Image (cartoon, rainbow, N blue to C red):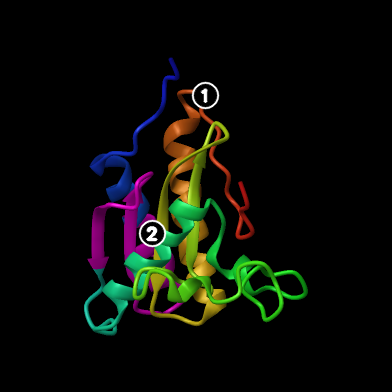
Amino acid sequence: MKQVLKLELEEAKVMIEAAKKKSEEINVLETICIVDDGGHVIALERMNGARITGPEIAIAKAFTAAGHKRSTHLFNKEPNGPVLPGNEAFGIQHMIPGKFAVFVGGFPIVVNGEVIGGIGVSGGNGEQDIAAGTAALQALQELFNKDGHEVIVTADIKK
């Protein structure tokens, strides 16, 4: 039997607040979504004035990152991104229309080497979405650090 950590609302709220704080610091309006390891939404928040398209995009980014255990921008990163023409997953984003994102802003939540969820951030440019997403991961690391759990805090996550 394998014991696993489960991401819950309390942790999701901490992550969203950290992402919002970073977004305010860098002057961008974001939508932030946290999903569990099955890609189901735990929490979603669209900052006041953020784009109306943000929720659907943030959900897709979080779903993709959790389900495929990699940061979404790695799908199309040169030269070997799997969705680039000629590579093994070219066109995969069309398999689950509206739920699969292959651009910057989605990150798996990896704790103690296991993917326990995903975060999707939408509203800024790539650099801004990365800053908000990694701030959320850092907040989770700080929360879990006291219990001895290790959270991967980086932009390029591939598990």
**Residue at x 63% of width, y 52% of height:** 158
Please tell me whether mark 1 sits on a helix, a strand or a loop: loop
Q: Secondary structure at mark 2?
A: helix
Q: Spot the residue most to the right.
A: 79
Residue displayed at 65% across by 68% down: 82
Residue nearest the observer in this picture, 33 or 38: 38
Disc 1 or 2, which lies upstream in sequence? 2
Which of the two marks, 1 or 2, is nearer to us in this view?
A: 2
Name the side, left or right, on which 56 lies relative to 100: left
The disc labelled 1 sits on which kind of residue? Gly
Which residue corresponds to the image point at 66% horizontal and 78% vertical from the top-left?
A: 84
In this picture, is 124 found above or below 131? below
- Which residue is depicted at the point 39% across and 56% down? 18
Q: Give the magenta-colored segment's residue range.
A: 17-45
From what the image shows, is residue 11 above or below residue 77?
Answer: above
Q: Is 30 included in the stretch rendered in magenta? A: yes
Q: From the viewer's perspective, is residue 39 above or below residue 132?
A: above
| Residue carrying label 2 | 63
Tag of residue 148: 1
In the rendered structure, the answer to whether residue 135 lies left or right of residue 122 reads right
Q: Position of residue 113 (x, y in %)?
A: 57, 34
Which sits in the foreground, 22 or 82? 82
Spatial CA distance of label 1 from label 2 is 27 Å
Neighbour tally class for label 2: few under 14, some 14-19, many 20 plus, Cα within 10 Å: many
Say whether residue 84 is magenta.
no
Q: Is residue 47 left or right of residue 19?
A: left
Q: Quadrant of the N terminus?
A: top left
